[in-house]
Amino acid sequence: MAKNNRSETPKTPRLVRNKNAATATAPLSEVKSPRAPQPASDPDSFERLNELIRMRAFELYEQRGRADGFEAQDWLQAEEEVMEQYRKRTA
């Protein structure tokens, strides 16, 4: 039997600092989207929503003083906030 050499992907999203300092520290409301949201079936739209969620989750992490152990809570709160904004824009 052949061995599977693929490494497992972590289940918890990793929060990675954005190299662009201007958007990394700016509140989500001030970050400009490069284009209008696309239909949910558009893979680019899905990627953009994930990026916005990741940025907001990182903001929440920083607001908490970079305390570890709240990754899932930050992600879920960020997801809720970003999706609410998305629904308002696409309604």
Image (spheres, rainbow, N blue to C red):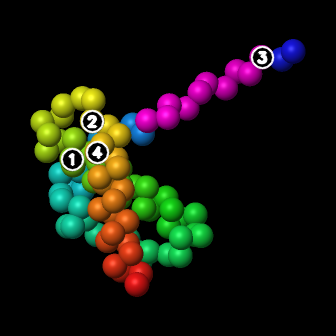
The CA distance from mark 3 to mark 1 is 40 Å
Magenta region includes residue 41: no
Asked if the residue at tag 3 contacts the one at tag 2, i.e. Cβ–Cβ closer than 8 Å, the answer is no
Q: Residue flagged by tag 1: what amino acid is it?
A: Leu
Q: Can residue 18 be seen in this view?
A: no
**Neighbour tally class for label 2: few under 14, some 14-19, many 20 plus, Cα within 10 Å:** few
At 28% from the left and 45% from the top, the residue drawn is 74
Residue 13 visible somewhere in the drawing? yes
Q: How crowded is mark 3: few (under 14 residues within 10 Å), some or many (20 or more)?
A: few
Q: Is residue 26 above or below residue 61?
A: below
N-term-proximal mark, 3 vs 1: 3
The residue beneath circle 2 is 70
Mark with earlier residue (2, 1): 1
Question: Which portion, as a residue range, is magenta?
Answer: 3-12
Residue 41 in the image, given as x and y percentages of width and height: 59, 70
73 over 34 or under it: above or below: above
Query: Mark 3: which amino acid?
Result: Lys
For the residues labelled 4 and 3, the Cα–Cα distance comes to 36 Å
Tell me if label 4 and label 3 are in contact, CB under 8 Å: no
Q: Which label was assigned to residue 74?
A: 4
Q: Residue 4 in the image: state x and y as whole percent.
A: 74, 21
Quarter of the image for residue 86 reads bottom left
- Marked residue nearer the N-terminal end (2 or 3): 3
Tag 2's secondary structure? Answer: loop
